[in-house]
Amino acid sequence: MVWRNALRVGAVLACLTGTGLAGPAPASAADRFTTELSGLPDRFTAGDQVRTVSAVVSRKGNGGCVKVRWSMVLSVQGLRLDQVKMDRVEETGSFPLEIRTEGAVARLTDRQLDPGTLCPDRTVTATYRVAFAEDVTRGRITMAAEAYDPNLRLLARQSATRQVVGTAPPPTTAAPEPTTASPEPTEEVLEPTEEAEPTEEALAEVPPPAAANRSANQSGGFGVVQAAFLLGGLLLFLGVGLLMRLRQLTRTAADGVEGDDRPVRRPVRWTTVRR
């Protein structure tokens, strides 16, 4: 919602003029006029929540009718005026206001007289829409509705003070986060088991372990069986080689023994025979 008359500290001081913040003295016959504030909550909540507050002035006794000009005085504690949004509305839409601020006090006065006319035993109502910025944490606001006649004589005044709180305090929202996040992984772990239970066709399609190993072997992968065959062949080859080498060494040793048993031929010496 676009607020045409949102309070802006500083800018309105240079551009707008209006009645003083203190207001004029009440009229001499003020005891015949009363003002009430209706629609006020127990406390205001900051954020996008918009509250509608009404100021009602009534007149009792004899006398003629009179036109009314409304003026709303706001004073804040613990928050700034630029964090308060207020709009004066009528059946035709937004009602023009003159705004003046001084410190933590702001006065919103109607530029025009109220469309209604205040007569004896009758009422005139002013409607306001109030909201607060999201960054407000805690504060207080006092609203004072004042009804004036066309000569700016105060007819009646009524005020009320309410607390303003933030939307959600940080400590309370941060605590439940780990508790809500912890059960999530357990639910995700149980999901596959729940999906696998109901269908028997899915169980029939799952191959047994032997068929799975057979399919893996048929796919051409190098498995444990191939490695065992290769290792057995290598050991067999080494065993045959060792046997052949041992046999060769045995034959060589036997040939050496047989050669040593042969008689040694001594050289024949020739002697001369003397005659």
Image (cartoon, rainbow, N blue to C red):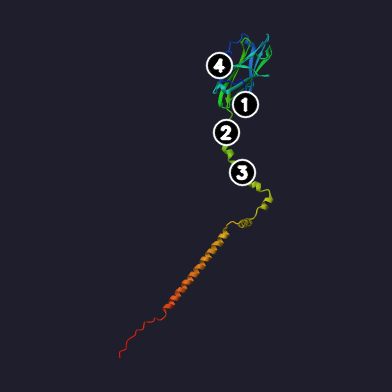
Mark 4 touching mark 3, by CB under 8 A? no
Q: Is residue 11 visible?
A: yes
Nearest to the observer: residue 244 or residue 62: 244
Nearest to the observer: residue 162 or residue 152: 152
Q: Which mark is residue 188?
A: 3
Q: Quadrant of residue 260?
A: bottom left
Label 4 – label 2 distance at C-alpha: 43 Å
Check disc 3 and report its element: helix, strand or loop: helix
Q: Position of residue 272 (x, y in %)?
A: 32, 87
Name the front one of labels 4 and 2.
4
| N-terminal-most mark, 3 or 2 | 2
Label 1 – label 3 distance at C-alpha: 38 Å
| Residue type for callout 1 | Gln
| N-terminal-most mark, 4 or 1 | 4
Q: Which residue is mark 2?
A: 173
| N-terminal-most mark, 1 or 3 | 1
Q: Position of residue 175 (x, y in %)?
A: 56, 35
Label 4 – label 1 distance at C-alpha: 30 Å
How crowded is the residue under tag 2: few (<14 C-alpha within 10 Å), some, or many (20+)? few
Check disc 2 and report its element: helix, strand or loop: helix
| Residue type for callout 4 | Ala
Q: Which mark is residue 14?
A: 4
Q: Which residue is mark 1?
A: 49
Q: Quadrant of residue 213?
A: bottom right
Residue positioned 48% across, 70% down in the render: 246
Left or right: where does residue 16 sit relative to residue 265?
A: right
Name the front one of labels 4 and 3.
4
Check disc 4 and report its element: helix, strand or loop: helix
How crowded is the residue under tag 3: few (<14 C-alpha within 10 Å), some, or many (20+)? few
